[in-house]
Image (cartoon, rainbow, N blue to C red):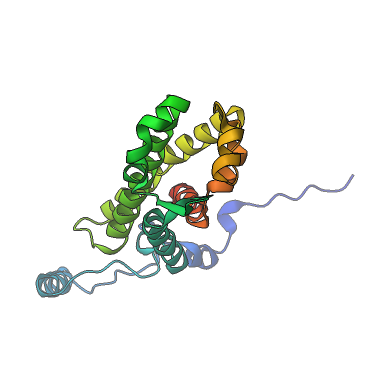
Amino acid sequence: MGKTETKDNTSENDDVRYQYIGFDVFGKKVKPFFKSDDEKKYYEQQVAEYAKTHAAPLRSGTAVNANLLPLVDKIILTISSIALIVGSLMPWFSVSSIYGDVSVRGVTAFSGFANFMDIMKEFSPMLPTLVYVFSGLAILSVLFGVLTLIMLYIPSKKNGSGLSGLKRVLGWHYFPIVVWFALFFYLVVGLKIPFGEELSAIYMIRGLGSSFNIVTFWTFAQPALWVTFAALFINAIKSNEL
């Protein structure tokens, strides 16, 4: 039978092990860095005096100093927030009839239909409610767009508080998105409009039929409405990345 060789750990070369020692663990062969306590106190005093008149920034390579909001994301949020504001101020709906084209802006949807509220109630009590919903969505879009720009470009006094505030504001964008999807789902069934087809034929209202549904909505909706909806969605998704 072959002999079994055993290796005594204590026989390892200490000079090799000492090459991997760090932090506060030292071997016996490591000499003190300072020659004396007086020399150590002298350098400590020098560092303390320097710190009184100089800032002590974090090391540039640390994760604490990492850029949590890249420039690309900041540009995207800026564009989408401006789109929220501008899109809500532009026409959301356009209705063609024998009287010409009537455009209704997002934030002024209520005032645009104010003179027709009583007539709209006669067709369906829910039609004025839809006007209120569209007006509210437009106002929220403008508000959230302004708040996002403020959080992006106004510096915060506390480190990290500005980013947390931005994340909170972007998270609020989910609320109007939920309302939009609920509205789309509701319009799949639609609202019955008595004599809708007759009115459409008499006044040549393009897109109007026996009901106000998702098809009617799509016909009346303008590009600015979809830009606003897309901008809400972009900002809300960005809140998940912060």
Does 230 sit above or below residue 53? above
The one of 151 and 113 positioned closer to us in this rendering: 113
As drawn, 146 above or below 59: above
Residue 142 makes an appearance in the image: yes
> In x, y percent, where is residue 152?
32, 60
- Nearest the viewer among 236 and 114 is 114
Q: Position of residue 84 (x, y in %)?
A: 40, 55
Q: Residue at x 37, y 49 (%)?
A: 141
Which residue is most to the right? Answer: 1
Residue 129 visible in the picture = no
What residue do we see at 43% from left, 68% from top?
71
The quadrant holding residue 87 is bottom left
Residue drawn at x 10%, y 74% as measured from the top left: 53
Viewport quadrant of the N terminus: top right
Query: Residue 215, image x and y in percent?
Result: 62, 40
Q: Quadrant of residue 157?
A: bottom left
Along the viewing direction, whichever of 169 and 160 lies nearer the viewer: 169
Which of 233/60 is in front?
233
Q: Count numbered badges in the picture.
A: 0
User: Picture coordinates of residue 76 (x, y %)?
Assistant: 46, 63
